[in-house]
Amino acid sequence: MDYKIVTDGSCDLPPELCREKGVDVVPFYVSFDSENYMREIADMPIRKFYDQMVADPTTFPKSSMPSVQDYVDVFQPAVEAGKAVICICITTKFSGSYQSAMNAKEMVLESCPDARITVMDSTINTVLQGIFVLEAIRMYEAKLPYEKVVEELEAIKGTGRIFFTVGNIDYLKHGGRIGKLAGLAGSMLGIRPLITLKEGEIFPSGLARSRKKSLEKVYDLLWQYLQEVHAVPGEYSICVGYGYDIEEGEAFRQGAVAFLNEKGYPVSDGEIQKYQIGATISVHTGPYPLGFGVIRKSML
C-alpha cells in the first residue's frame, strides 16, 4: 500500500527539500520569553532565531514539543487518503514528541481502525535525524513496501552517531542537557567540549582549548567511528550540521572531504551535504554547534 513519511521538526531538513520529497514535518515550538511560543520555521525562521540568539546572549530560548493535535492534523488526512504512515520522531531521551505522536495515533485509530501508522523513536536528532528521514525517502522512491521500510529503518537507526562541539557549555547547562557532561568541562573558561550522541543520549568525548582544535578532534571522532564499524566508502551517509555561521559550516564540510580522502576513504564533494541545525536543538547547544551526523545506509 502507499504510505507517507512524517517527521518532527528536529530533523532540520530544509523546508524546500521536504516539500519536494513530500515529507510532512510536525514543528516544535520555540520561545524567548517562556510565554509566547512560535512554530519553528513557520512562525520563527531559523535565521531570525539565530540572529536573536547572537544579539542577546543573556536570554536563553526554550523549546516545546508538538502537541497531540499537531500530529492528528497530519495523520488524519493521510489515513483518509488511504495511505499508511511512517512517523520518525526525535529520541525520547530528549523530548516527548514520540509520545504525542503515539497518542495521536490512538486518536486516529478510534475513527479509522484500519489505519496503519508506525511511530518510531529514531533514538537520534537534528541533522542525523534528517539523513535518516532521507534514507526512508530513498527506500520509498525505490518502491520498497511499507513493512520493509520500517524493518530497514529499525535495523540502521542504532548505527547513527553525532560528533560535535559547541561554542561554550552555557546553553547545555541552562537547558538541563549537561547530564553526563557535567564533570567534563567544569567551570574552566575557554574549554570546548567534544560530544557524541549515540543510542539517544549524549556522552563526553574529550576537551579542546580552542575552536580550531575542537574541530580537528571532531574529524578524528568521525574517523575513529568509521574504522570501528569497518565502513567502506559509500556504505554510510555523512552530513555536516552547523549553526549560525554558514561560512564556518561550509569550510568544515570542505575540510571533511579533504580529511577523509587523505585518510584513504574516498568521498566526492557532493557526498557530504551540510544542513543548518534548527531551533529545537540549538536552544540546548547555543548558536555555534558544529559537527557530523553519520549513519549506515539501508541495504536496498
Image (cartoon, helix red, strand yellow):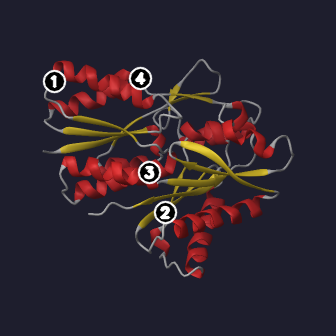
The mark nearer the N terminus, 3 or 2, is: 3
Q: Where residue 67 is drawn, which disc sits there?
A: 4
The reply to whether the C-beta atoms of the residues labelled 1 and 2 are less than 8 Å apart is no
Q: Nearer the viewer, residue 94 or 204?
A: 204
The mark nearer the N terminus, 1 or 3, is: 1
Residue 87 spot, x, y in % from top left = 32, 38
Q: Is residue 105 left or right of residue 178?
A: left
Secondary structure of the residue carrying numbered label 4: loop
Vertical order, 261 against 7 (above or below)? below
Q: Where residue 51 is drawn, which disc sits there?
A: none
Q: Which residue is mark 3?
A: 158
Q: Which residue is mark 1?
A: 112
**Is there any visible trace of residue 13 in the rendered image?**
no
Residue 271 spot, x, y in % from top left = 45, 69
Secondary structure of the residue carrying numbered label 1: loop
Residue depicted at 73% across the width and 49% down the height: 167
The mark nearer the N terminus, 1 or 2, is: 1
Q: Amino acid at mark 4?
A: Ser
Instruction: Count all numbered tags in the image, as a single digit.
Output: 4
What is the C-alpha distance between the residues marked 1 and 2?
Answer: 39 Å
What is the C-alpha distance between the residues marked 3 and 4?
Answer: 27 Å
Quadrant for residue 144, please give it.
Answer: bottom left
Q: Nearer the viewer, residue 291 or 106?
A: 106
The reply to whether the C-beta atoms of the residues labelled 2 and 4 are less than 8 Å apart is no
Secondary structure of the residue carrying numbered label 2: strand
